[in-house]
Image: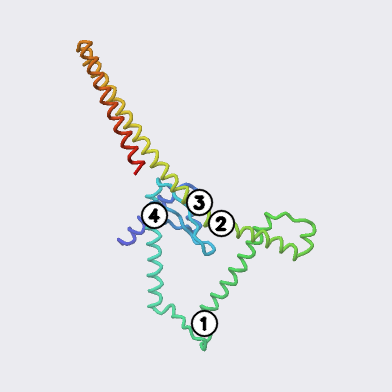
Amino acid sequence: MEGEKEQKKLEEEYKKALASLPENLQQLIMQGFKPSYHKRLKRWILRKQIGGKDNIVYVPKEFSNAMQVIKAYNMKKKAEKLTEASDYFLEGKIREIQKDERKPIIKKEIEDAAWTHNLYHDLGKYAFTQLVKYVEWSPNDTKDSEQAFNKLRTYFDTLLKYRDQAKTIQELQEQILRYDMFTTYLESQIKEVVEYVDELKATIEKQQLFIQLLLSKLDPATAKRMLAAFAATIEASTFEQKESSKKAEIS
């Protein structure tokens, strides 16, 4: 009873998390994309193997909590399937397939072979109907089956090339993401420098006011003498810096 309540709660949380996502992300999950946390990028992605290659879609950070719930639900379902298969095997409902050529083909292998054949047939039919929609057919194409097939094959090969470029596109997306992160960091550093300069400017203005106030309290001769001594100190400091730079260049 407790397990059923927990299962129901998990399913409700899953439905709520799925409903909170944009429609395009919902569609991807329904198509078999699984949420995964990218440790290096520190963000969630949707991943699916297509044609032996990873297809990755980046998920906005505001949907991180929803991704966690969906991943937990998927892991729970996967664990249940493994447990169910294990129970069936232990109960003798499924017997282990022995890899022995001397034994006759068992029913399960026949079913698997038929399933594979049907898959190829349906997939080929689907691919054909989809390709035909996007190809312009001339009268000659429709008369010559071999020519029509070659035209479809060329179009399909072009699509496969686009698929092969998916990895390059993914790498570019990651580079753009790194560039965006660097730009954000650079903007924060520039902002800090500007704030520091503003503080320094305010400090200098206060010091100028203090000096003006001090000079106003002195007689003109004393004030002139103090300013001359201050100017001489600055000039001497500048001369020392120039000499030090020259020595550094010579060495």
Q: Secondary structure at mark 2?
A: loop
Mark 3 residue crowding within 10 angstroms, few (<14) / some (14–19) / many (20+): few
Q: How many marks?
A: 4
User: For the residues marked 3 and 4, what is the alpha-carbon distance in whole angstroms?
Assistant: 16 Å
Quadrant (top left, top right, bottom left, bottom right) of the C terminus: top left
Q: Earlier in the sequence, mark 4 or mark 2?
A: 4
Relative to 189, is 31 above or below? below
- Cβ atoms under marks 3 and 4 closer than 8 Å: no
Image coordinates of residue 78 in percent, x first then y, are 40, 64
**SS for tag 4?**
loop
Residue 26's tag is none
Q: Quick one: SS at disc 1?
A: loop
Among the 4 quarters of the image, the one containing residue 213: top left
Residue 228 lies left or right of residue 15; in this view the side is left
Q: Position of residue 55 (x, y in %)?
A: 50, 57
**Around disc 2, counting alpha carbons within 10 Å, would you say few (fewer than 14), some (14 to 19), or many (20 or more)?**
few
Spatial separation of the CA atoms under disc 1 and disc 2: 42 Å
Q: Identify the residue position indicated by label 2 in the image.
A: 165
Quickly name the residue at label 4. Answer: 40
Q: Crowding at label 4, few (<14), some or many (≥20) Cα neighbours within 10 Å? A: few
First reached walking from the N terminus: tag 3 or tag 1: 1
Please name whichever residue, 159 or 133, is drawn nearer the observer in this view of the structure. 159
List x then y, in percent, for residue 249: 36, 41
Contact (Cβ within 8 Å) of mark 1 with mark 2:
no
Residue shown at the point (53%, 61%) measured from the top left: 50
Q: Nearer the viewer, residue 185 or 16?
A: 185
Q: Disc 4 and disc 2: Cα gap in Å?
A: 23 Å
Mark 3 vs mark 2: which is more N-terminal?
2
